[in-house]
Image (cartoon, rainbow, N blue to C red):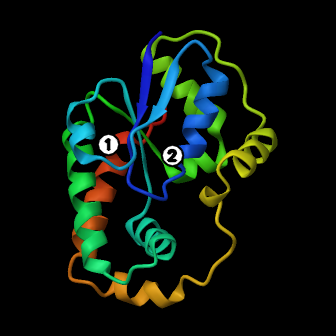
Amino acid sequence: MDKINFISFPRTATTYCCEAFKIALPNYHSQIIYHKIDSLKKEKNVVTVVRKPELAIRSTLEIYKKNDVDLYLDWYIEFMEETLNRLDDIFVTTFDEVTNDINKVINKYCMKKNIKNPHLINTKFLLDRLKTSCPGNIPAKRKYKTFEKKILYSNKFSTANNIYNKILKSIVELPG
């Protein structure tokens, strides 16, 4: 059985994406290798979900209850640099694509890998399944504003944002 490795920065809808792939492609073993930069460097058949740095960092800070914005920005920058280095041999999608149209993401992956007939995903069913199996991954609405200024005014934010935008430009579908 072929394996699909999901390796992303925290709080990017990776669990949601992986669970959707498990349903859509039952003949493949979909697994999450949580946030490991070394795994991102060496694993084959990788799916990475990217998210705007301010949103990924803000959500990560809230979940991990730590205040060190620069620590998480350094981690984000290192992770995104490695993603940028591997764009030619990994499948990259965005948080917005995953959360807005997971079937489109799966179809793009299948087209790239020449996989036929993925199952369609019922997003309500998938969300209900995730709420049951891993409730901590779907956070309640929280107040993120306390971290927002710290992130946006950090000296490292512009570097993180530039890398994110380079990745985004590389994966955007051109019309026609």
Residue at the front extreme of this rendering: 133
Judge by depth and name the residue closer to the eye, 168 or 4.
4
The spot of residue 25 in percent (x, y) is 60, 19
Judge by depth and name the residue closer to the eye, 106 or 38.
38
Which is closer to the viewer, label 2 or label 1? Answer: 2
Residue at (53, 87) in percent of width and height:
145
Q: Is residue 48 left or right of residue 82?
A: right
Residue at (37, 84) in percent of width and height:
67
Residue matched to label 1: 170
Tell me which numbered mark, 2 or 1, is placed earlier along the sequence: 2
Crowding at mark 1 (Cα within 10 Å: few <14, some 14-19, many 20+): few
- Measure how far apart labels 2 and 1 are at the Cα level: 20 Å
- In the image, residue 17 above or below residue 51: above
Count every numbered label the image shows and give the total.
Answer: 2
Residue matched to label 2: 14
Residue at (49, 54) in percent of width and height:
12
Image marks 2 and 1: residues in contact by CB distance under 8 Å: no
Tell me, for residue 70, which label it has, or none: none
The spot of residue 27 in percent (x, y) is 58, 12
The spot of residue 135 in percent (x, y) is 68, 56
Residue at (54, 51) in percent of width and height:
13
- Quarter of the image for residue 43 reads top left
Q: Amino acid at mark 2?
A: Thr
- In the image, residue 111 above or below residue 97: above
Q: Amino acid at mark 1?
A: Ser
**Secondary structure beneath disc 1?**
helix
- In the image, residue 143 above or below residue 49: below
